[in-house]
Image: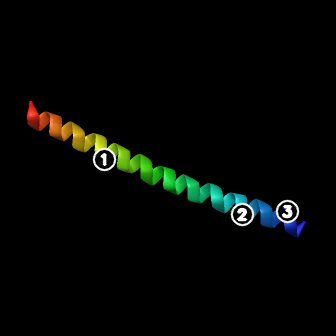
Amino acid sequence: MLYLEAVLASFYFAFTRFNLKGAKILHDLTRGAKNLQDLTRFEF
């Protein structure tokens, strides 16, 4: 039973770490898109 809990905990930690990394990547992408939008607005 303890082994199963350890496996579930490791999966949970890996999943949350992946979600945090994905959220940061998504944040960087949206910020990059906003910067690109500002650049195009400045250009036109």
The answer to which quarter of the image holds residue 39 is top left
Horizontally, is 1 left or right of 41 in the view? Answer: right
Horizontally, is 28 left or right of 4 in the view? Answer: left
Position of the N terminus by quadrant: bottom right
Q: CA distance from mark 3 to mark 1?
A: 40 Å
Q: Which residue is mark 1?
A: 31
Q: What SS does tag 2 mark?
A: helix
Task: Name the N-terminal-most of marks 3 and 1.
Answer: 3
Q: CA distance from mark 1 to mark 2?
A: 31 Å
Horizontally, is 14 left or right of 2 in the view? Answer: left
Residue ranking furthest to the right? 1
Are the residues tagged 3 and 1 within 8 Å (C-beta)?
A: no
The answer to which quarter of the image holds residue 5 is bottom right
Residue ranking furthest to the bottom? 2
Query: x, y percentage for residue 25?
Result: 43, 50
Q: What SS does tag 1 mark?
A: helix
Above or below 21: residue 33: above
Task: Name the N-terminal-most of marks 2 and 3.
Answer: 3
Density class for disc 1 (Cα within 10 Å; few <14, some 14-19, many ≥20) is few
Q: Which residue is mark 3?
A: 4
Q: Amino acid at mark 1?
A: Arg
Residue at (72% x, 63% y) in the render: 10
Query: x, y percentage for residue 18?
Result: 57, 54
**Residue 10 disc label:** 2
Q: CA distance from mark 2 to mark 3?
A: 10 Å
Task: Name the N-terminal-most of marks 1 and 2.
Answer: 2
Q: Amino acid at mark 3?
A: Leu
Residue at (73% x, 64% y) in the render: 9
Query: x, y percentage for residue 23?
Result: 47, 51
Q: Amino acid at mark 2?
A: Ser
Density class for disc 2 (Cα within 10 Å; few <14, some 14-19, many ≥20) is few
